[in-house]
Image (spheres, grey):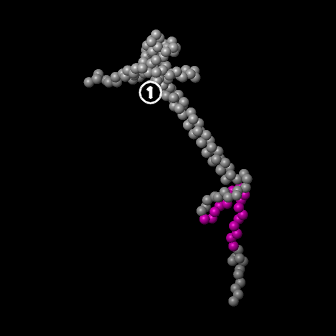
Amino acid sequence: MLTSIGPSRLMTQIPSPPVPGRGQESSTSGKVSCHSPPHGSNCLKRRNAIALLCALIMLGLALVFLWSDDLHDELILLLQPPYRVTQVDAKGGTMTVEGVNEAFVVRCHDQCGSFTVGRKYAMLYHGSTLEFRSKGTKLAFEITEIHVKPPAVPGGMG
């Protein structure tokens, strides 16, 4: 038995052709895939931007790693209070430098004449040396004595 098929049953849904430059959309996941997009597509531009951003981040991290020691020292010089020179003994080649909680006696040899008593200088404390930086030069003074000041306690100690 033959049945006639009307024009309404012959019409099927024909998928529309993909729009150039937009990638193709998967019907199962709903995500845009960028397989073989033409030049100038958004996917290609997005990939280039991500690659450029990653390269810039890696370059920035490398620069921070290379300069971290110098940057750390410069930040400490800016943030810590300077040391005050309280005494200079040019004959003995020593000077006394006072910090917030301690006083150091350092060997300064022939550089003792460069420092003025009562003046403050930014220096870095590196364990057994005090480092003074001025106009690109670094002078490291060997610490011979350390005098720790007692903490200031309101009402005395006791």
- What is the magenta range? 12-28
Classify 13 as above or below 150: below
Q: Is residue 22 magenta?
A: yes
Residue extending furthest toward the left: 158
Tell me what residue is drawn at x 59 percent, y 62 percent. 29
Residue 108's spot in the image, x, y percent? 48, 16
The crowd level at tag 1 (other Cα within 10 Å; few <14, some 14-19, many 20+) is few
**Type of secondary structure dominating the magenta stretch:** loop
Q: Which of 46 and 90 is in front in this view?
A: 90
Is residue 51 shown above or below 111? below
Identify the image quadrant of residue 33. bottom right
Q: Can residue 115 be seen in this view?
A: no
Which quadrant is home to the C terminus?
A: top left
Instruction: Tell me the quarter of the image containing the N terminus.
Output: bottom right
- Residue in view at x 50 percent, y 26 percent: 77
- Position of residue 9 measured from the top left corner of the image (x, y, whole percent): 69, 77
Task: Please give the count of numbered marks on the rendered protein.
Answer: 1
Q: What's the residue at 64%, 58% (across, down)?
A: 32
User: Which residue position is annotated with label 1?
Assistant: 127
Answer left or right for 108 relative to 42: left
Q: Which of 67 and 7 is in front in this view?
A: 67
Q: Where is residue 60 in the image (x, y as percent from the top left)?
A: 59, 39
Going by the picture, which residue comes out furthest to the top? 91
Q: Is residue 98 left or right of residue 136?
A: left
Tag 1: residue type? Gly
From the viewer's side, name the closer residue of 123 and 153. 123
Q: In this view, does 53 lie above or below 134?
A: below
Q: Is mark 1 on a helix, strand or loop?
A: loop
Q: Residue at x 60, y 42 (%)?
A: 58
Measured from the top left, where is residue 75 in percent x and y? 51, 29
In screen coordinates, is 66 left or right of 16? left
